[in-house]
Amino acid sequence: MTASTQVSATEPAPDRAGPLLTLDGVRVTLRGSGVDLVRDATLDVGAGETVCLVGESGSGKSVTARTILGLTRRDPAFAVQGRITLAGRNLAEAGDGELRRLRGREMAMVFQEPLSALDPVFTVAAQLSEALRREGRSSRRAERARMRELLGEVGISDAGRVLRSYPYQLSGGMCQRVMIAMALACSPKLLIADEPTTALDVTVQAQILDLIDRLRSDTGMSVLLVTHDLGVAAEVADRVAVMYAGRVVEVGEPAQIFGGPRHPYTAGLLACIPPLEGERPGRLPDIPGGVPEPGRLPAGCAFQPRCARALDRCGTEDPPLVTAGPVPTACWNPQDGDRS
C-alpha cells in the first residue's frame, strides 16, 4: 500500500446504512489554558462502514479517536464538550461505569504503537485473557480455545508460541495482529484503528489493512481508521473525512475526494502525491507552512495563511462545515466556485 494509490472519479458510491457513530460539535480543550485541540468536530460512521480520518500530524485525529472512547474525559487535563452518540447512546453524558461496559463490547480501539500499548511484563495470553473476561466467565479450556480462535482470525498460525510470548519477542506486525485480536475479543460494533500500519513495512501494511477489511466484511462492524496515508484511504474507505487544525473540513466518498476535492487543503494534500504516470516533476509541490499550533490559530479560517485561494473573508470568519450538496466542505472559496 502506498500513498500514490489513485481512485477513479467515476467509481460508484457504496450504499450506507444509518449512522452507528455520530460526532456533533465535539470540542476538546486543555484546562487552564483554554486551548482547543479539537474544534467543533462533526462526523458520522454508518453501520458496516469504513471511514478514514486523514490529515497531517497535529490535526487532532488521535485526540478525536481517544475522545470517542472517553479517554480524554478521564484525563483531568482535558475538558470535552459536544455530543457523541453510539447506537443512540450519548457517550458524552455516560458515566465511567457505563463507558467501561461499552468498551470492548460496543467499541474497541487499536492504538498507534502496539509495543507501547501492550504491557511488556505480561505474556500475550495474560493480556488477551483480560480482554476475554468482558465476555463473561468461562472455563480455562474454553478461554484458551477462544484465544487460539482469535489469533487464527487475525492470521496467526502458531498461536501456542505467540500466547506464551512477551510483546518484545514478537515483530511489530505480529504485535499489531495481537492488538487487533484483543480489540475483537468481545465482537465490538465499532473498531477505531489509530494509524494501525505505522512503522510497518509495505507488505505487512497491506496484510493488516486487508485483515481489518475482511473482519469488517465478516462481522458487519464499523471501522473508523485514522491515517495520514492518502493511499490507504483511497484503498479501504467508504468515505474519507479530512481534518485540519482540529476540525473536519471536508467529507466525501473516495471518488469525490480524490477525483474532485473542493477544499484547498485536500487539493494540496493530493498534489503532494507523486504521479504514477507521465512526466515526473523535478520537485514535488508542497503546502507552504505547517499546521498551526492549537494555541496559535490565526483569525478566521485556520488554513487561510497557507491557502492560495484565500479571500478577505477567510481572514476574519471561520467557515462552517456546510452539509448541503454532495460533499460537505468548510470553505468560503471551494475549488468549484465561490460560496455565498
Image (cartoon, rainbow, N blue to C red):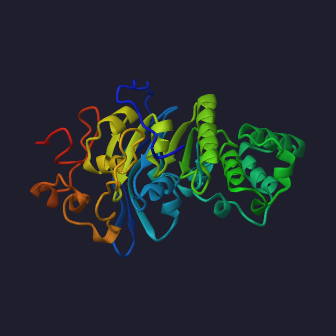
Q: Quadrant of the C terminus?
A: top left
Report how many numbered discs are placed on residues in the image.
0
x, y percentage for residue 181?
70, 45
Question: What residue is shown at x 57% (from left), y 55% (from top)?
Answer: 198
Q: Looking at the picture, tell me which residue is in the foreground, 336 or 30.
A: 336
For residue 24, say whether it is visible. no
Q: Position of residue 77 (x, y in %)?
A: 46, 71
Q: Is residue 36 above or below residue 104?
A: below
- Say which of 155 and 223 sits in front: 155
User: Height in image: 148 above or below 292?
Assistant: above
Figure quadrant of residue 339: top left
Q: Residue at x 20, y 44 (%)?
A: 334
Image x and y of residue 143, in percent: 83, 44
Residue at horizontal 49 percent and vertical 37 percent from the top: 235
- Residue at far bottom of view: 32
Q: Is residue 100 left or right of residue 160?
A: left
Q: At which x and y percent is residue 6? A: 42, 37
From this viewpoint, which residue is outermost toward the right? 141
- The image shows residue 258, relative to residue 117, as above or below, that is above
Any part of residue 324 in sight: yes
Q: Quadrant of residue 277?
A: top left
On-image quarter of the N terminus: top right
